[in-house]
Amino acid sequence: MIAKVIVDISNSEVDKIFDYSIPSDFELAVGDRVLVPFGSRSIEGFCIKITDCSEGNYKLKDIIKKLDDKPLIKKEMLALSDFMKEKFYLRYVDTLRLFIPSKLRGNKVKALQREFCTLSSSDTELLKSRISPRAKSQLAIIDRLAGGGEYLTVLNTEFSPSVINSLVEKGIITKSKQEVLRKPIGEIDKNINKVTLTETQNKAISIIKNSDKRVVLLHGVTGSGKTEVYMSLIEDALIKGKTAIALVPEISLTPQILRVFRSRFGDDIAMLHSGLSDGERYDEWRRIYDGDAKIVVGARSAIFAPLENLGVIIIDEEHDSSYISESNPRFRTLEVAEFRAKYNDCKVILGSATPSVESYNNARLCKFGLSEMSNRISKNGMPEIKIIDMAQELRTGNFSVFSNELKEKLKETINNGNQAMVFINRRGYASYMQCKSCGYIAKCTDCDIALTYHKEDNMLKCHYCGKRFKPLDICPNCHSDSIKQGKIGTEKVASELQTLLGSSVKILRMDNDTTTTKTAYLDILGAFRRGEAQVLVGTQMIVKGHDFPNVTLVGVLDADMSLYFSDYRSCERTYQLITQVSGRAGRKDKLGEVIIQTYSPKHYLFNFVKNYDYKGFFDKELNTRQVTNFPPFTTIVRILVTNEVEEKSLNCTKKIYDLLKELRVEYGKEFVYMQAMKSPINKIQNKYRYQIVIRIKRKFEDEILGKIYNIVDNNKQGNSVFVEINPQNMS
Ligand code: ADP
Ligand code: ZN
Ligand code: ZN
């Protein structure tokens, strides 16, 4: 028999698949990790297929050996690999790298092993009789080990190594190697009590269970108790002897959900996310692979956890953009989840207070099931939201970053012994130009999307069509010359707050600068939870999922910053951000309050936010997308070509563009838009960037995308060429 083996998965940029013959004296299965001869070396590979014929007519070499007892890549994952190859145009190497922790590739492994000491006989009296009764410490060691054994490193801290060694020499202590698992999660919090589910939660659960749809959207307002619903679904899976995956968007969110999950499920949980060391990841992966962990909690890559017999897949905060991997290997988590759910015949649960337009639309179209929870667990209900017009503040002489109302409320909150969160919306900061007096924003005349300011050539540019405009100096709407194009940072806000509130108030700051170390998130969030600070100032990181019972006030500075971010999703993003951050207020027994500061208080979005009217927002947004031909009615494809030699990237772009024009002829009206242009940022790291932006209708999407990928793959001409679908960033 012949094995198709993919080799060198750690380094290779191409799929290196070779045929090897399987020696008759051993059995090989698909998915096995093997050692094979390669040139003059022997290297590691994975068997992805077993056949009885080889295409080449050269003499095949034998596989040297099998490296594990069982195939490392299970059947389901091989099928998933084929699916992802088709769906996302990946290669085997790309998928294998996603499936297997880096420590396991190229045989870099190792399980952590430590020396373990045990007694050579369980008859301690017999052992003791062999040593002098005066050798007190030797006798003590025997007593110490009588209960089972101990790691040598631990024993060394309690007894002198020479005494231990003399017992080893006498054959009384036996040393052996034992594998230790590196456990990344700490102790179980026993203070979390199991709650009785509310009627609403029970109803939501039964709708999910009875749905005939593979994917069910759980739309529950912030604080409606979605976590308990997830846990109940997971418990159900475990009772049936099945397993579960729960995905959360970011590491900063994991400690929270993990704490609750751990108190319920204990050591059944493994976690996988980017904050783990390679060793920890390897050990967690092994626990999952061996079936010792039944529940995996983690970020998007945890969707590839080698669990068998899945009973449910949960994607919490499903609207979060981190579930889409845009750079290689590109994939959409939901589609992978759907594949695994189909394979295991289980459901995918998408949870959010602010579902993505795409997902909610799928629920409306009955492609997804829908289960809703419209009230908070807390009897106080949703916090009241107030919109403050910052232009008005300026007119009345308040030049601070805080409105008078927010200042008052902050003081009041702290005087009452409560906590506040101040959120700074930094997404797309300083990238647009806005009139401070009337809130006017410069938009593209063709695309109705906010223009982005580019400092290097002092131009406003449209990221969708490449059009360029002069920067604003006078507002065309109200003729004011006070044009805003600055940013406020967390540091500045924190220091202004300190001045405002006095030095006795403790303020914590959470942003990219303060969270560079591995434990920083946990430290900051933990300190705030314990009440060691009264105010937490932060960026996007503080928005998600946190459940701090003492937070009664949330302030949102510059709420409109992301509203005009040059992206067709900017309204959606802003709605999600503001609603989520507002959702941090008043979650437990105390009433919450939210203050939103903006220069465009009349924007329709704020009315929906204020009234917690997701459906109203959705209808309006969907209508806009339809009229302007944006997703979910179309799919945006960006082909980005880069090269150090400008002419080369330009020529390649032209070539691909010409071929795409032929494709457009073939498909006619399915192409809504197609244009080649310089990228808005024309040069990054000395590489010149050109791009082709296409919008196609959804009907023949898969077919057309396949052809686009084909054209691109065959015409790279030595350039780096990336195809991005509905990219988050068009610069
Ligand atoms: P969401 O994820 O929907 O924003 P959470 O799951 O964090 O909401 O729940 C909000 C709060 O309500 C948490 O403090 C949680 O412990 C509490 N909670 C949830 N379900 C119940 C229940 N059935 N009884 C009492 N408290 C609950
Ligand atoms: Zn103006
Ligand atoms: Zn435009």
Image (cartoon, helix red, strand yellow):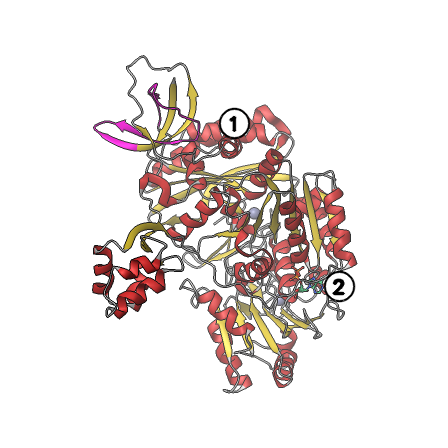
Amino acid type of the residue tagged 2 in the rendering = Asn
Label 1 SS: helix
Q: Quadrant of the N terminus?
A: top left
Q: Earlier in the sequence, mark 2 or mark 1?
A: 2
Give the secondary structure at mark 2: loop
**Quadrant in the rendering for residue 375:** bottom right
Seen from the viewer's position, the closer of residues 11 and 319 is: 11
For the residue carrying disc 2, how many other residues have a C-alpha within 10 Å: few (<14), some (14-19), or many (20+)?
Answer: few
Could you tell me the amino acid type at mark 1? Lys
Report if residue 356 is visible in the image: no
Q: Report whether 335 appears left or right of 328.
A: right
Could you tell me if the residues under marks 2 and 1 are in contact, i.e. CB atoms within 8 Å?
no
For image coordinates 33% across by 60% down, the residue present is 125
Q: Which mark is residue 247?
A: none
In front: mark 2 or mark 1? 2
Residue 178 appears in view: yes
Residue 40 position (above or below residue 521): above
Q: Nearer the viewer, residue 634 or 164?
A: 164
| Magenta span of residues | 17-43
Q: Quadrant of ligand 2?
A: bottom right
Q: Is residue 407 above or below residue 626?
A: below
From mark 2 to mark 1, how far is it between C-alphas?
Answer: 45 Å
User: Number of labelled discs?
Assistant: 2
Question: Disc 2 marks which residue?
Answer: 611
Q: What residue occupies the far top of the structure in this picture? A: 57
Give the residue displayed 68% in from the left and 63% down from the top: 223
Q: Is residue 512 magenta?
A: no
The residue that mark 1 highlights is 707
> Residue 591, how many percent across, how many down?
71, 74
Q: Is residue 279 left or right of residue 161?
A: right
Q: Residue at x 56, y 39 (%)?
A: 336
